[in-house]
Amino acid sequence: RLSAYVYTRHRFWSKHIAERKDRAAQLGKLGFLWERLQPEWNLFIEALSVYKAIHGDVLVPAKFVVPRSGEWSKACWELPLGSTVQRIRIRHDYLTGDNSYERRLQLDRLGFVYDVSEVKFDKFLTAVKYFRAIKRQRSTVRIPSKFVVPREKGWPEELWDYPLGARSLAVRQKQLYVKGRPDRQRDLEEVGFMLQDGNAKLGWLAVVQAAAIYSQMHNKVLNVPLNFVVPGPPLDADVNCYENWPWPRRLWGLKLGQRLKDVRQKGAYLKGSDAGIRRAQLNQLGFVWTPKRGRRKRFVGEIEDFEPESCLLKDDFDV
């Protein structure tokens, strides 16, 4: 476009207009926007600030272009704000060089989002938590596929009209937000949102792998305390211990005790065509289906007894 050419070609300006007052006067009569003749970064920040004031966030759609309306400075009209935001996220445009630190601070003050998927997942997780609390579902959260967050007391305004049912269906059927992210899968399972079909298999793999490691550490007996959570290495562990820690990073924080309790009491993971295979896996690991009541005896070699030099498991095992 002509405007893009004139406003972004400084050589054209210095050659044809800067030293010609008559031409500058002619442009003034035509309504030329002198404010546009400033660094593109300044215009971007101005437009992004206005967008936040209007919409409450800086999650600018990729195709958004600043409209010609009174809410926006004329200098920013027709600025491709959405594509600029995308380029900053993907290519880090404007964020290299001497001004990179100051510019990142400007973006941080505006609440700039570098990873949109994380924001969307957090919103979904928050909505699930509120649904569980409001509907008083204590175990597995069951959300109707057509459920939309109502404009009612108890729900945060930022969640009103949120299509929670459709999003839940997409999470289960298309792995929306959770594909390749076992940490997010665990976050959802923690609040009772059980993944089904292919996603349930991913959740089961984490449980059975952790169960296999625990069984190996306890003489082929799988009797996990309810409050047991897969630990990470000690904060003061040396490099050798950290590298040979028996629990993979992706399992740290997994509430294995609670998961296996759900297996016993609710039949979690034991439904469908894979139920028989999974029962056999648990039996092979020495799973205790009916724990004895009373105080559980502590095994030598439990994680509390681990020393840095004993991080590496002596035997391999198959899951």
Image: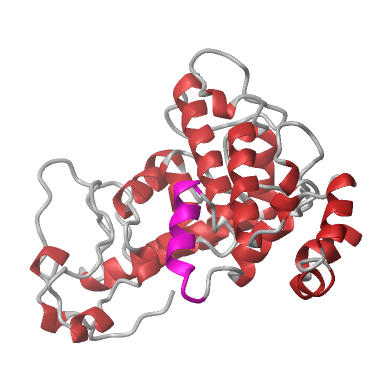
> Which residue is drawn at the image coordinates 44% and 62% (left, top)?
102
Taking the magenta stretch, the answer to whether it contains residue 101 is yes
Residue 247 vs 81, above or below: the answer is: below
Q: Which residues are magenta?
A: 97-111
Q: Is residue 286 left or right of residue 48?
A: left
**Residue 118 screen position, x and y as percent:** 53, 52
Q: Nearer the viewer, residue 149 or 111?
A: 111
**Does residue 95 appear anywhere in the picture?**
yes
Q: Nearer the viewer, residue 89 or 20?
A: 20
Check the image and name the residue furthest to the top: 153
Residue 18 vs 275, above or below: the answer is: below
**Residue 157 screen position, x and y as percent:** 55, 23
> Which residue is drawn at the image coordinates 65% and 57% (left, top)?
85
Q: Nearer the viewer, residue 133 or 313?
A: 133
Residue 111 vs 154, above or below: the answer is: below
Q: Is residue 112 left or right of residue 281?
A: right
**Does residue 271 appear anywhere in the picture?**
no
Q: Is residue 145 left or right of residue 184?
A: right
Query: Which quarter of the figure is the N terminus placed in?
Result: bottom right
**Residue 217 screen position, x and y as percent:** 22, 72
Which quadrant of the structure image shows residue 264? Answer: top left
Which quadrant of the structure image shows residue 23? Answer: bottom right
> Which residue is drawn at the image coordinates 58% and 69% (left, top)?
92
Q: Is residue 74 left or right of residue 206?
A: right
Which quadrant of the structure image shows residue 310? Answer: bottom left
Residue 106 vs 162, above or below: the answer is: below
Report the predominant secondary structure element of the magenta stretch. helix
Instruction: Give the tally of numbered discs.
Output: 0
